[in-house]
Amino acid sequence: MVAESEPNLFGLPAEIVRDDDTGERPSADMPEAPPSDVGLVVVRRPDRIGAGALVLAGVAANVSLSLSWAPGDGPSGLSLLRRGVEELGVGAGTWALNGLWQPFVVVLCGGLLVLLGLLLLVPARAHRLVGVLALVVSLTAATAIVLLMADGGWGADQFGPGMWCAVAVPVLGALGSLKAMLTTPLVTVVPS
């Protein structure tokens, strides 16, 4: 028991260090002060996983060019792309109304996603800006795919393998862009 006249801390005897006490205190009681010659540094690094997803989105867009977008022997993605470019030369109004702009937009977005994926391989503190740009491109491709599927009546049997590869473009693009946007910077302690 602690006497009433002695100082205490929550009922325990308080340890009082006097100025004339030159003895070293035990190291367990003394908190270790951080050295003054260290600093925090943000590490520059590539985002390989996000880059891989964006490049795979571009690969899916390229594969969709060689496959049929309709069941059976329907038009390939490359023939749809050619017709879309020809119609674009005629006029933008007819191009938007005839439904040939969607394959063109999906392939264009796939190419842009490859370029953005390569930018993710450049070491940086964070790749948030590239991630936001990739998300915008992915949402543009998703809009084209959704409108194309709505024109087809949402039936899975009405689309060929090229169309399903085109569906992979916005999905992989969104995954890669979210990975790039949500990855936090790596901070480390280094001596100054």
Image (cartoon, rainbow, N blue to C red):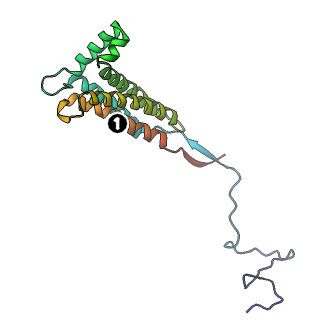
> Which residue is depicted at the point 13% across and 23% down?
73
Q: Residue lying at the far top in this picture: please name it.
A: 90
Q: Quadrant of residue 137?
A: top left
Q: Which residue is mark 1?
A: 172
The total number of labels drawn is: 1
Q: Quadrant of the N terminus?
A: bottom right
Residue 184 location (% of width, % of height): 52, 45
Q: Residue lying at the far left in this picture: please name it.
A: 72
Residue 128 location (% of width, % of height): 51, 36
Residue 46 location (% of width, % of height): 46, 37
Secondary structure under badge 1? helix
**For the residue carrying disc 1, how many other residues have a C-alpha within 10 Å: few (<14), some (14-19), or many (20+)?**
many
Residue 55 location (% of width, % of height): 35, 31
Answer left or right for 159 relative to 21: left
Answer left or right for 190 relative to 15: left
Q: Quadrant of the C terminus?
A: top right
Front position in the image: 187 or 94: 94
- Residue 32 higher or lower than 93, as above or below: below
Front position in the image: 94 or 55: 94
Amino acid beneath label 1: Leu
Q: Quadrant of residue 29?
A: bottom right
> Which residue is depicted at the point 37% across and 12% down?
92
